[in-house]
Amino acid sequence: MVIYNIKVLGFEDAIRGMRNPRNSWWLSDSSVDNNEFTLGDDDFKLLAKLVRGGAEHRKVLRQIQVNCEIIAPLYWWKQFDTYKVGVSANSTSTMNSITRDEFRPEMFELSKDLEYSEAFQAVIKELNELRELYLEDSGYKQQAFMAMIQLLPSSYLQLRTITMTYEALLNICMQRKGHKLPEWKSFVKAMKSEVDYLSVLMNKARG
């Protein structure tokens, strides 16, 4: 699993809007220098207070966007797809690209033991034979294509470009931080270390 190109967008507008309900813009101490936004201490205290107040008070988080790119196995994406609100994605198409390249072990999320197992090697061999049959276009094109789709292991890696709100990301990290799949641990770790203030906000929200 690989997570990269993490970007946080919209902080400036969201923090300004956070103060709309009480018309307290004059108390804002955040700043912008050379197009770089810095969250002030007073704005951070209000932000943390709103987070502690629960989902109905932290609308500000829904106006902050987190963009990233993730390469992960299909079995992990199946779980990630349960998050529909505040999350959108564009993925590489299995249907359109499955025959583009010969199948290789690095296209799958595998332990070393499984990578060299006879069972996995047999699956790779069968997938590549079906791919050749598909490319030959010998009258079995559709059958070969469907067989590849049906035989494809759920460990197959897929790239998606993800956009989610800070609220959605906060909920995902809080709900999945103790999950038994190692991919979730990698996701939470990457987001905590790369996204500004997320770890602190999560700790404040628990308090």
Image (cartoon, rainbow, N blue to C red):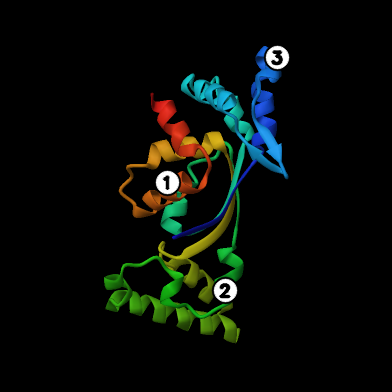
Task: Tell me the quarter of the picture where residue 90 sits.
Answer: bottom right
Q: Quadrant of residue 8?
A: top right
Quadrant of residue 28 in the image?
A: top right
Q: Which of the two marks, 2 or 1, is nearer to us in this view?
A: 1
User: Where in the figure is residue 97, as x and y percent of width and height?
Assistant: 59, 70
Lateral position of residue 172 relative to residue 9, left or right: left
**Amino acid type assigned to the residue bearing label 3 in the image:** Asn
Asked whether 138 or 52 is in front, the reply is 52
SS class of the residue under badge 1? helix
Determine whether the residue tagged by mark 3 lies in a helix, strand or loop.
Answer: loop
Residue in the picture at 47% in, 71% down: 147
Q: Residues within 10 Å of mark 1 (few under 14, many from 20)?
A: many
> To which residue does mark 1 refer?
188
CA separation in Å, label 3 and label 1 = 35 Å
Q: Are marks 2 and 1 in contact (CB under 8 Å)?
A: no
The residue depicted at 51 percent of the width and 69 percent of the height is 146
**Picture coordinates of residue 62 (x, y %)?**
60, 32
| Residue holding disc 3 | 23
